Amino acid sequence: MGLRIALLNASYDPVETRRNFRRELDADLVEYHTPSGEIPETVAFDACVVTGSRASVYWEEPWIDDLKSWVTGAIGSGLPALGVCFGHQLLADVVGGTVEDIGDYELGYRTVRRRDGTTLLAGVDEEFTAFTTHSDRVSDLPEDARLLAANDYGVQGFRANNVFGVQFHPEYDTTTAESVTRNYLGNGREVEDERVKQVLAGIDDENYAAACKTKQLFDSFTQYVRQHRDVGQPVSG
């Protein structure tokens, strides 16, 4: 039986986000565009996935509060969850971690160091390439969380029981990486144009091929969800 997963699309421009996750996740995705106020009325799913967003988890926005409330209840019911970028930060926040503004932007293909090769990052190299775009980070994890990956900007992956998060974007293709990066052009208060141009120059076949190795974490997550559904409890590893 196939998986039924709630896709909590937190992007203000949801089309590319929808396309990327539907391509990468082998499941029946039931989508909710959370900035529009769409929140599931039930937790009757096999798992949930929270996507990236330009928002910050500490903004005082009704939709963010509603999303946190639903995710807290879903996790409390035992539902496995995966968060990417904003989703990673939101999940860390609801399980007791801390999210902060780093006063800078991590942008482009970056080197990340795997700290734990079980479950989510099984098969991923100890040092791997991933595309990043964020100005917030998870600065502290709850005591019971396991650090899965990190780099100079901080936590890049974690696990807390059934909850998994990655700061980088394994779902991106080069089209999305380019469009997201070009949005920074002409806004020097965020990222200087010269730096943006360097990042754009680095969006090439070689870096994309290297970053594609992280896409296997989606298969690892869906495999975990199937095992969890079959045994009815968290899976060790």
Image: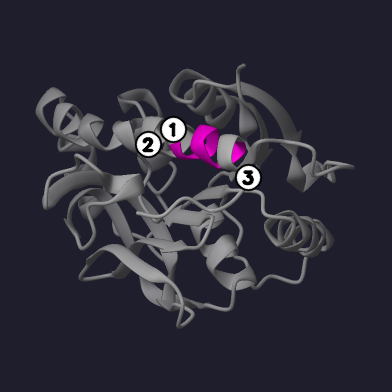
Q: Quadrant of residue 135?
A: bottom left
Please provide percent x and percent y for residue 205: 14, 23
Q: Visible in this render: residue 221?
A: yes
- For label 1, the crowd category at 10 Å Cα-Cα, with few meaning under 14, some 14 to 19 and many 20 or more, is some
Q: Amino acid at mark 3?
A: Gly
Please provide percent x and percent y for residue 116: 24, 59
- Residue picked out by circle 3: 232
- Residue at 57% over, 22% down: 27
- Residue picked out by circle 2: 220
Q: Which mark is residue 204?
A: none
Task: Single out the mark in the foreground, 1 or 3.
Answer: 3
Q: Visible in this render: residue 171?
A: no
Marks 2 and 1: in contact by CB < 8 Å?
yes
- Residue at 52% over, 77% down: 97
Q: Secondary structure at mark 2?
A: helix
The alpha-carbon separation of the residues under discs 1 and 2 comes to 5 Å
Q: Amino acid at mark 1?
A: Gln
- For label 2, the crowd category at 10 Å Cα-Cα, with few meaning under 14, some 14 to 19 and many 20 or more, is some
- Residue picked out by circle 1: 223
User: How does the figure colour the protein chain or chains?
Assistant: one colour
Horizontally, is 136 left or right of 58 in the view? left
Q: Amino acid at mark 2?
A: Ser
Q: Secondary structure at mark 3?
A: loop
For the residue pair 36 and 139, the one nearer the viewer reads as 139
Range of the magenta residues? 224-229
Q: Secondary structure at mark 1?
A: helix
